[in-house]
Amino acid sequence: MKAMGNHNYHNAAVAALSVLGLDMGIEADSISELAETLKSLAHRMQIVHRDTYGVTWVDDSKATNVESTYTGLMGLKEQKAVVLLGGVAKVIEDTNSNGFRKLVGPLMHHRRVITFGFSGSMIYETLQAGGLTIPCIRVKTLEDAVSCARSIAGNGDTIVLTPGCASFDEFKNFEHRGKVFQKLASTS
């Protein structure tokens, strides 16, 4: 599949098994051939670029809350990623928490975290207080985060924008943020 994340593979497998189980006259070989052409929706763990240094760039700008980011990170456990988190964090109702502490476990599998945007400092502090042991860097903007990530990532690494935040500090919406990320990724 042309998508990142184990959750995308699991969803495709469940769909394939459902079609086969319903005996709709579709052969398993046909499903297998079709699966190779599937790609994710825009800004949802979308592979947007593979650069000449062997780095894969993934746009998950639709991850506008911690739960979505958590799901994406859990699906990337086998990747060594530089993870970009930031924007305007949402407060979880009735807890006065931003929820980012929940990401410490899944982030431990990756190479580095870069926080950016309006809530970047708060995210950085929450992760540090939560016991994050991989390096975490704080920058100002998404453009700065991409530049920093590019200087860190090596052959076989993934750079993933999975912000866990709204985009309104720098962008009109998550689509705008994703398009800017894609443009920055392709200028390597």
Image (spheres, helix red, strand yellow):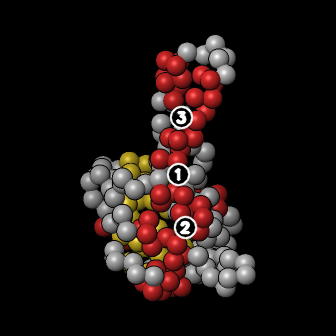
Residue position marked by numbered label 3 in the rendering: 13
Depth order, front residue of 68/57:
68
In the image, what residue type sits under mark 1?
Met
CB within 8 Å, label 3 to label 2: no
| Mark before the other along the chain sequence, 2 or 1 | 1
Residue position marked by numbered label 2 in the rendering: 163
Q: Determine the CA span between mark 1 and mark 3.
A: 17 Å
Residue appearing at x 43%, y 69% in the figure: 105
Q: How many marks?
A: 3
Q: Position of residue 60 (x, y in %)?
A: 55, 57
Q: Determine the CA span between mark 2 and mark 1.
A: 12 Å
CB within 8 Å, label 2 to label 1: no
Q: Position of residue 40 (x, y in %)?
A: 56, 43
Instruction: Find residue 8 and name its label.
Output: none
Q: Position of residue 124 (x, y in %)?
A: 47, 82
Q: Position of residue 118 (x, y in %)?
A: 58, 81
Are there few (<14), some (14-19), or many (20+) residues within 10 Å of tag 1?
many
* Front position among marks 3 and 2: 3
Give the SS element for disc 3: helix
Depth order, front residue of 119/12:
12
